[in-house]
Amino acid sequence: MADSLPAGWTLPALRIDVEGEWHDGDVQITHAGVLANLRGTLRRDTGGYFIQTRVRIPVEVADAPFVVTRIERRGDALHAWLNDGAEQDVDPATLRVGAADVPYCAVKDGAFEARLSRAAAYQLLALADYDERSGRAALRLGGREYSLARAFTIIAVVLTTLLGGTVWWAWSADDPVSVDAIGDRVQTRSGGALPVFAGPGETAALYRFARERGDVLTWMPCTCGCAGLGHTSNRSCYIKAESGDRTTWTSHAAT
């Protein structure tokens, strides 16, 4: 292996940020082909992350090199989508909560660890059975039970705090929170009650306005590019459906 640099050649300063995005110094790498090559040739040994060409090119990783963007149950398996476009089953036994209270799991046949995105973490929450009396949560797959009590408590607290809301439990007998196909949390409530993910302050005021002044938001186009998701106006980012006095809210506007 040749470790000496060719004359006039400088090693790129490759790094992966906490969101799984690649950079060369301060410049983000966005070319799909280049990204595919970098992610596909990434390696790790006792010396850290690197890409091996004619020389070893170190890669600085801020957190984890991959991000789970979506996760769901498929039969007795836990299936995940990664930020490199790959899909794979995840061993639930590798799920853990790190020192920074962020959920992780093993990917790429155990060669790397991936950080669960906020959407994926909530999708994982929706798959667990939660016992309010004991405070215990468990994921049941393939006849086995994986205890997630500590992880689910931390995830629920941390992620909702990041959204600017107060601490709340994801489930209750009357108003369950679930996750839809695009990773948004949804909650159906009666009597005009706001969803738990609306939180306090300005965010709650916006959700209240969406309910009370639908005549205004219905005529306002959405600018976040969600028309392809079936949204017909800005109000669709707050309210998914309505039936009588029951409103199904979506967290799309809060994320």
Image (tube, helix red, strand yellow):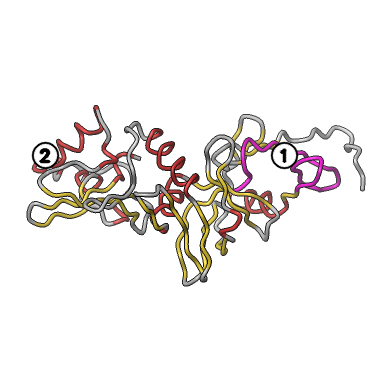
- How many marks are shown on the rendered structure? 2
Residue shown at 78% from the left, 35% from the top: 11
CB under 8 Å between discs 2 and 1: no
* Residue kind at label 2, given as amino acid type: Val
In terms of image quadrants, where is residue 129? bottom left
Crowding at mark 2 (Cα within 10 Å: few <14, some 14-19, many 20+) = few
Q: Which label was assigned to residue 216?
A: 2
Residue shown at 47% from the left, 48% from the top: 149
Q: Is residue 139 left or right of residue 130?
A: right
* Frontmost residue, 29 versus 39: 39
Q: In this view, does 247 lie to the left or right of 41?
A: left
Please say whether residue 51 is one of the residues in the magenta stretch. Answer: yes
Residue furthest top as drawn: 201
Residue 194 percent coordinates (x, y): 19, 41
The secondary element bearing badge 2 is classed as helix
Q: Name the residue under label 1.
A: 59
* Residue kind at label 1, given as amino acid type: Val
Could you tell which of marks 2 and 1 lies nearer the N-terminus? 1
Label 2 to label 1: alpha-carbon separation: 49 Å
The secondary element bearing badge 1 is classed as strand
Magenta segment boundaries in residue numbering: 44-66
Main secondary structure of the magenta stretch: strand
Residue 60 percent coordinates (x, y): 70, 36
